[in-house]
Image: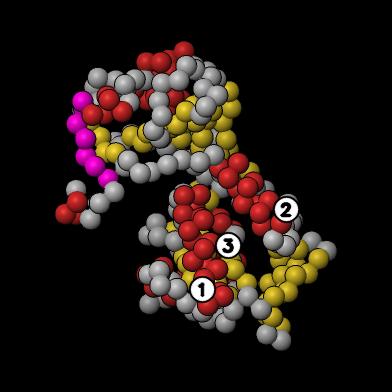
């Protein structure tokens, strides 16, 4: 795989797979491992980022629409409920709603709204350490220290952006549960305790929109991470801060520009 550019991934046979994941079914012939990868709990991680941001002076408003975005006398203005915030720089990082904002500002893009589903199980005895992703069927899962198992993989719910709600597809969730049971016998006695879906933005080319606006000075876009936002968010935020503060970055981002859709 190295000649193809996959320097951080390694193709392994069934023997090595079962050494890393002893509980996997004998029917699995091998896999791909990324030995330097890691995992984090989204709720704890995002809460930690939020607390640090607030300590540094960030103002956070939740559950309120951002409307009436306009530029007046060199400053961007955004109405948030009864409040209005103004600044020389505006970052459009509104996730699934960012496409609407981009269109309102004259930069429409081919973005769709998706709602990946997740399930959490009752605790089971510890049986796995790595995060597992299955190819061929939609499945990803990881076990937490308390024994519960998070099951995902890409099956989609039906999103309602206007109400910020989703309708779960229980048939697809049942399909994921059956796949887990086929691969890991230890999971056959587990029960599903809850399920949910998040609302995200997916670009037509699965590549995020990142960088300065092609039309407006002081406007930046950062959205459309196509179900990889949690993984890429910290690094993307650091590069965006560099762009805004220093006016450029050594990170190659030209291919992510919103201008690619108007060319």
Residue linked to disc 3: 93
Residue in the picture at 39% in, 56% down: 206
Q: Where residue 62 is drawn, which disc sits there?
A: 2
Residue linked to disc 1: 243
- Element class at badge 2: loop
**N-terminal of the two: label 2 or label 3?**
2
- Element class at badge 1: helix
What colour scheme was applied to this rendering of the protein? secondary structure
User: What is the span of residues highlighted in magenta in the rendered image?
Assistant: 9-15
159 relative to 68 in the view: left or right: left
Of the residues tagged 1 and 2, which is closer to the observer? 1
13 relative to 197 in the view: left or right: left
Marks 2 and 3, Cα distance to the nearest angstrom?
14 Å
The quarter of the displayed image where residue 132 is located = top left
Of the residues tagged 3 and 1, which is closer to the observer? 1
Residue in the picture at 34% in, 20% down: 23
Say whether residue 68 is visible: no
- Magenta segment: does it hold 11? yes
- Magenta segment: does it hold 33? no
Residue closest to the eye, 108 or 69: 69
Does 123 sit above or below residue 52?
A: above
Which residue is situated farthest in the left direction here? Answer: 3
Residue closest to the eye, 182 or 170: 182
The quarter of the displayed image where residue 181 is located = top left
**N-terminal of the two: label 1 or label 2?**
2
């Amino acid at each position: 795989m190295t000649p193809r550019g996959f320097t951080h991934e390694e193709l392994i046979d069934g023997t090595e797979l079962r050494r890393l994941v002893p509980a996997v079914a004998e029917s699995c012939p091998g896999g791909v491992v990324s030995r330097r990868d890691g995992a984090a709990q989204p709720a704890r991680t995002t809460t930690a980022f939020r607390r640090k941001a607030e300590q540094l002076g960030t103002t956070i408003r939740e559950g309120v629409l951002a409307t009436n975005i306009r530029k007046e006398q060199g400053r961007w203005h955004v109405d948030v409920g009864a409040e209005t915030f103004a600044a020389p720089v505006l970052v459009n990082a509104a996730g699934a709603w960012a496409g609407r904002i981009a269109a309102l500002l004259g930069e429409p893009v081919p973005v769709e709204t998706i709602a990946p589903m997740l399930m959490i199980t009752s605790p089971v005895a510890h049986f796995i350490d790595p995060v597992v992703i299955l190819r061929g069927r939609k499945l990803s899962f990881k076990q937490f220290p308390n024994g519960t198992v998070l099951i995902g993989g890409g099956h989609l719910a039906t999103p309602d952006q206007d109400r910020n709600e989703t309708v779960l597809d229980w048939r697809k969730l049942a399909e994921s549960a059956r796949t887990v049971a086929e691969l890991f016998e230890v999971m056959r006695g587990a029960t599903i305790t809850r399920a949910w879906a998040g609302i995200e933005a997916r670009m037509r080319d699965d590549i995020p929109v990142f960088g300065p606006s092609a039309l407006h000075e002081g406007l930046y876009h950062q959205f459309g991470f196509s179900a990889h936002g949690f993984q890429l968010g910290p690094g993307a935020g650091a590069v965006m801060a560099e762009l805004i503060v220093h006016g450029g970055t050594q990170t190659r981002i030209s291919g992510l520009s919103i201008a690619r859709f108007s060319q």
